[in-house]
Image (cartoon, grey):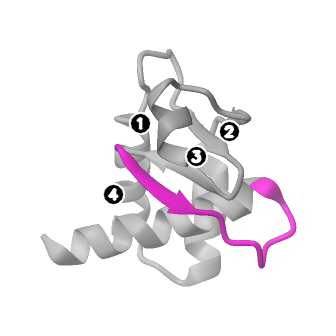
Amino acid sequence: MWWELARKYIFEGYIEPKKTQIQECIYHKGHSKEMEEYVWHAILQHKMGYAKPHIPYLLDAFLFDGKRIKLDQRYELFEERVLYPLIEHLRQEKVRK
């Protein structure tokens, strides 16, 4: 059902990540400056036709680069529920390369 809605581009909303938010999340997780640059570059490439990068979400997951990534419910702020799993996803993707 989630994919059916996502294909039609029906989402609850989206977040527009800011570089400072990414920096704070990277610092909190103890990743390097290189990782911060890698994540920010990946997010900048994810504009989906808009002027600013944005990440659409629906129910318990969000869409990034054609992949469904689950929100992390351990965080209080919604942006953190999106950004921390996104950073982890990109970190794992980088390691596989």
Tag 1: amino acid: Leu
52 vs 48, nearest the viewer:
48
Alpha-carbon distance for marks 2 and 4? 19 Å
Q: Which mark is residue 15?
A: 2
Asked if the residue under mark 1 is in contact with the one under mark 4, i.e. CB atoms within 8 Å, the reply is no
Tag 4: amino acid: Tyr
| Residue at disc 3, secondary structure | helix
Tag 3: amino acid: Lys
- The segment highlighted magenta reads 66-78
Magenta stretch: residue 65 in it?
no
Q: Residues within 10 Å of mark 4 (few under 14, many from 20)?
A: some
Q: Is residue 38 above or below residue 26?
A: above
Alpha-carbon distance for marks 4 and 3? 12 Å
The residue to which callout 3 is attached is 19
Alpha-carbon distance for marks 1 and 2? 13 Å
The residue to which callout 4 is attached is 38
- Left or right of 93 on screen, residue 20: right
Q: In this orientation, does residue 35 appear?
A: no
Tag 2: amino acid: Ile
Alpha-carbon distance for marks 3 and 2? 13 Å
In percent of the image, x 46 and y 73: which residue is there? 88
